[in-house]
Image: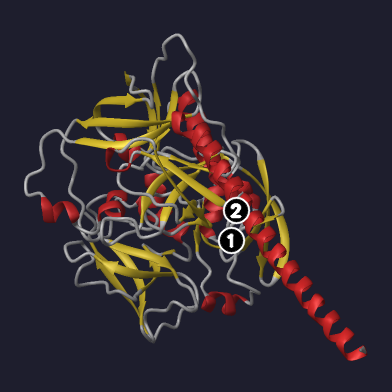
């Protein structure tokens, strides 16, 4: 009897366990289904918040654009693949119509889009989600960030502007929703995640701090909205990386915080006002990090300063490594450049730097990016002597017999320039007309004083030996 009781008890316990498992499975299935429905409703809300604010842009260009080549970094190469236009069009039409998207960011009619969508446009037409068309005015654009601002005049009712988010608060893995007009198909929405933030060195524009997403972006999505799960605008879709011309899972968007700053400057001043401290910076490679005794590759190496610029006045030196701005760490030299450019003018910033393995803090007054920056850039690309030069770095010697540990090295000699046949790549420039040359600043200052057409005495080191040479600048 005891045995039979135990067996009966075991039977009913087994039945109960099966029933519990079935109930648990059913409950889990219901819970999962409700979760999916909740997610779907969240996307419904995003669509309701964003679709009406995204517009279609049609721009007729004044002149045919220069066709991109295989080495081009034009954003359209990313959309269509290398040399797409060269392979498919022999003679581009005199007037081209580009299709893209834009985002209404103010109910008064201001629209954010990409510079490349409206570049050289003679006429810009904006079509709203309700099919109403407006002729748009170009308020201004900034090719350095690929941001443009348009304005349309609304009718009696306010326009459906989007709510702006905070791109600095994004995390990898967050939902990302793209809305635009791919291939002219308006009101198209795709969903993905934030794949990366702070993406730079992509080669699309000068100031890069892209949001990377795997939300499907295709031709025509340019200038459209990238939204978060709350339906707030976090970026302006700009480009995709592709070799086929179609979606490959890598898209880039301009962070809304950067786009807001550009838009504000354009509306207020007609152009972008950027911060500047007058330094020439370079990335920190693993070899440089080891040579400089750094703990990581993060930060930016100061390879030179503009004479009498803010950094020079503040005491920043060649060889300093900037690691923090206002106590916030910087990722790399792109990060330093971007954050300085967005800093308020005539406002000090605190820079934490490493100098000879010791950490210190320097206050630098941010100045306005100078109008004659091309002259400053000539420090890298001087044409007077027909050569290009750079600061010597211990790990980047191009000449195995280079004995100098500091100074200026010639990295390129123009075959048609005055130095052709006299100077060689790898030569170290020691003096110009008996003036010692130790930094790029020295070189720039001295070159600027040379009288045109008169012979110049150079003292150089080539391998083991130094020598004097004479050339006549153009």
Q: Residue furthest front?
A: 1
Q: Is residue 137 above or below residue 273?
A: above
Secondary structure beneath label 2:
helix
Tell me if residue 366 can be seen: yes
Residue shown at the point (45%, 8%) measured from the top left = 156
Task: Report the Cα–Cα distance between label 2 and label 1.
Answer: 42 Å
CB atoms of marks 2 and 1 within 8 Å: no
Q: Which numbered dot is residue 33?
A: 2
In the picture of the structure, the residue carrying the numbered disc 1 is 331
> Which is nearer the eye, 321 or 12?
12
102 versus 463 height, above or below: above
Q: Tell me which corner region of the image, top left, top right, bottom left or bottom right, holds residue 240.
A: bottom left
Question: Which mark is first along the chain, 1 or 2?
Answer: 2
Between 209 and 286, the residue placed more toward the observer is 209
Say whether residue 308 is visible.
Answer: no
**Residue 2, numbered circle:** none
Q: Residue 28's x, y, as percent?
A: 67, 60
Name which quarter of the figure residue 463 lies in.
bottom left
Q: Is residue 9 left or right of residue 319?
A: right
Give whichever of 342, 180 is nearer the camera: 180
């Amino acid at each position: 009897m005891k045995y039979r009781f135990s067996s009966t008890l075991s039977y009913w316990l087994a039945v109960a366990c099966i029933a519990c498992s079935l109930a648990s499975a059913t409950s889990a299935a219901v819970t999962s289904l409700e979760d999916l429905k909740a997610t779907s409703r969240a996307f419904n809300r995003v669509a309701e918040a964003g679709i009406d604010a995204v517009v279609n842009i049609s721009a007729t260009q004044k002149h045919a654009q220069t066709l991109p080549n295989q080495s081009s970094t034009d954003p359209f190469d990313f959309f269509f693949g290398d040399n797409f236009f060269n392979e498919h069009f022999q003679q581009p039409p005199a007037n081209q119509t580009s299709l893209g998207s834009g985002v209404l960011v103010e109910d008064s009619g201001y629209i954010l889009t990409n510079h490349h969508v409206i570049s050289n446009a003679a006429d810009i037409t904006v079509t709203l989600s309700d099919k109403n068309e407006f002729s748009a005015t170009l308020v201004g654009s900034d090719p350095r960030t690929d941001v443009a601002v348009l304005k349309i005049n609304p009718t009696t009712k306010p326009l459906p502007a989007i709510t702006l988010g905070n791109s600095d608060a994004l995390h990898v893995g967050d939902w990302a929703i793209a809305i635009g007009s791919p291939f002219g198909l308006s009101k198209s929405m795709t969903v993905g995640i934030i794949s990366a933030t702070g993406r730079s060195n992509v080669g699309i524009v000068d100031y890069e701090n892209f949001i990377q997403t795997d939300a499907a972006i295709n031709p025509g999505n340019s200038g459209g909205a990238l939204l978060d799960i709350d339906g707030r605008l976090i970026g302006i879709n700009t480009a995709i990386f592709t070799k086929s011309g179609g979606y490959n899972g890598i898209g880039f968007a301009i962070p809304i915080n950067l786009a807001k700053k550009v838009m504000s400057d354009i509306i207020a001043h007609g152009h972008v006002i950027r911060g500047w401290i007058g330094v020439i910076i370079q990335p920190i490679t693993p070899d440089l990090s080891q040579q400089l005794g750094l703990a990581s590759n993060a930060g930016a190496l100061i390879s030179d300063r503009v004479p009498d610029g803010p950094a020079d006045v503040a005491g920043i030196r060649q060889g300093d490594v900037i690691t923090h701005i206002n106590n916030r760490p910087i990722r790399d030299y792109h990060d330093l450049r971007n954050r300085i450019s967005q800093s308020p003018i005539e406002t000090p910033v605190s820079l934490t730097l490493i100098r000879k393995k010791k950490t210190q803090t320097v206050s630098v007054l941010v100045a306005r990016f100078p109008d004659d920056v091309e002259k400053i850039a000539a420090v890298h690309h001087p044409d007077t002597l027909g050569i290009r030069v750079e600061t010597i770095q211990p790990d980047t010697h191009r000449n195995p017999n280079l004995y100098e540990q500091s100074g200026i090295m010639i990295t390129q000699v123009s075959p048609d320039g005055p130095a052709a046949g006299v100077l060689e790549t790898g030569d170290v420039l020691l003096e110009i007309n008996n003036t010692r040359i130790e930094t790029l600043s020295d070189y720039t200052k001295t070159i600027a004083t040379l009288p045109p057409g008169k012979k110049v005495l150079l003292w150089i080191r080539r391998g083991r030996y130094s020598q004097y040479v004479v050339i006549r600048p153009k």
